[in-house]
Image (tube, helix red, strand yellow):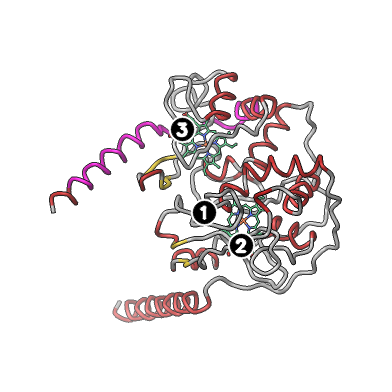
Amino acid sequence: MKKVLKVVGYVFGGLLLLLAGFCAYVAAVGVPTYDPPTIPEITVEKTPARVARGEVIAQIQCMECHANNQNQVTGKFLNEVPAIFGKLYSKNITQDKEKGIGNWTDGEIMYFLRTGIRRDGSYAPVMPQYPHMADEDLKSVVAWLRSDRFPVQATKEEGPESELSFVSKLLTHTLMKPLPYSPELVSLPDSTDPVALGRYTADAIGDCYSCHSGDLIDQDKIHPEKTKGYYGGGIEMVGDGGKPIVTANLTFDEKTGIAKKYTKEQFIRMVQTGVRPDGTILRRPMSPRPMLSNRELGAIYEYLKTVPKIQNDIAKRNAELELQNTQNQKATAGR
Ligand code: HEC
Ligand code: HEC
């Protein structure tokens, strides 16, 4: 019996040592670097139509994280990210050759947006990847980045480097990985099929599921629909004034989802304006999406109808958090 215990002890001790060694390694190495990739040679033709479409996508995606108060994409502090992930800053992606991405080739930008890997093999874990954005739309983003539009004009302004917490570093050795580059063409959805258009607009363009699912980190970027709690919401984020806020359940669950809450027309208006039919405001980090058309948002509504229903009572969670928050504030004030 004693011998067994001893063996168990050794095994356990050995595992702990291994774990400690792994943690020390992660702390020392930080975010892993990968082999410098072979970048495809792509030159994007910058047509006015592409610049216009790229601007729409940029307003939904890139501006949210990269634009400063003057509306230039100089990079900024990402204040909605919970503190346990560290202090995260995005980067200058203006046309400046030194501080921005003026020196990147079109191919390098497209490769990076698909995979998260820069030409030197370094990996940007916080930056979302866009594996399902159609080639045509990705080219539009590049055309916009290279255009004469105000937000992308060269500026030298630069934010501090991100300080990733140990948790974030650990995640880059486990759950957060670059995505493989596929040379295959990703085509636009059939725009006459509302469900296909809705799925594409929600998952590939709006990245709606990345906030409206069960976990901020543990997501299946290759098969979004396999992500835990897909469109069931429930991720806790940092809202205005540092207040906790939970993302909404967008499935058609009759009790806790949007099925009985909003008609299609109400849904479209609400997402475009950021105001619910009852006059309450959608709080940050949910921002209005006036750039999405009635057709695109109506299509998202049709697609959400087809997504497996999830029962998840967000109103209850929000109320609990609100209570906790006031209690914490009282406790701090009483000290
Ligand atoms: C959720 C926030 C977020 C969104 C949305 C986002 N980015 Fe980023 N981006 C970041 C962060 C954070 C970094 C810095 C990553 C790092 O240093 O590890 C970054 C880095 C980059 C870089 C690398 C810059 C450099 O000098 O290394 C490029 C290029 C870029 N983003 C382009 C874009 C474009 C184009 C879009 C829109 C299609 C976009 N980003 C959307 C957060 C975001
Ligand atoms: C950065 C994270 C984030 C992204 C991306 C995001 N949302 Fe949200 N969304 C939220 C949060 C947080 C709330 C809760 C707002 C509140 O309670 O005031 C919310 C609320 C909503 C609501 C209100 C639901 C209700 O029952 O009141 C709708 C509708 C919605 N989002 C649709 C979308 C759509 C469509 C997209 C993609 C185009 C999207 N969201 C992208 C974070 C996000």
- Is 8 rendered above or below residue 157? below
**Residues rendered magenta in the picture:** 302-330
Is the distance from the Cβ of mark 3 to the nearest ligand 2 atom less than 8 Å?
yes
Amino acid, disc 3: Leu
Residue of label 2: 177
Mark 1 → mark 3, Cα distance in angstroms: 23 Å
Mark 2 → mark 3, Cα distance in angstroms: 32 Å
Residue 176 sits in which quadrant? bottom right
Q: Residues within 10 Å of mark 1 (few under 14, many from 20)?
A: some
- Is 194 rendered above or below residue 215? above
Horizontally, residue 194 falls left or right of residue 238, namely right
Residue of label 3: 282
Q: Could you say which disc has been placed on residue 47 in the image?
A: none
Q: Nearer the viewer, mark 1 or mark 3?
A: 3
Horizontally, residue 244 falls left or right of residue 109, namely left
Horizontally, residue 256 falls left or right of residue 224, namely left
Amino acid, disc 2: Lys
Residue 231 % position (x, y) = 54, 37
- Considering the image in quadrants, where does the C terminus appear? bottom left
Is the distance from the Cβ of mark 2 to the nearest ligand 1 atom less than 8 Å?
no
Residue 9 % position (x, y) = 34, 78
Residue of label 1: 217
The secondary structure that dominates the magenta segment is helix
Determine contact: label 1, label 3, CB under 8 Å: no
Which label's residue is closer to the chain start, 2 or 3? Answer: 2
- Is 309 rendered above or below residue 58? above
Amino acid, disc 1: Ile
- Element type at mark 1: loop
Which label's residue is closer to the chain start, 2 or 1? Answer: 2
Q: Nearer the viewer, mark 2 or mark 3?
A: 3
Residue 60 % position (x, y) = 62, 42
- Element type at mark 2: loop
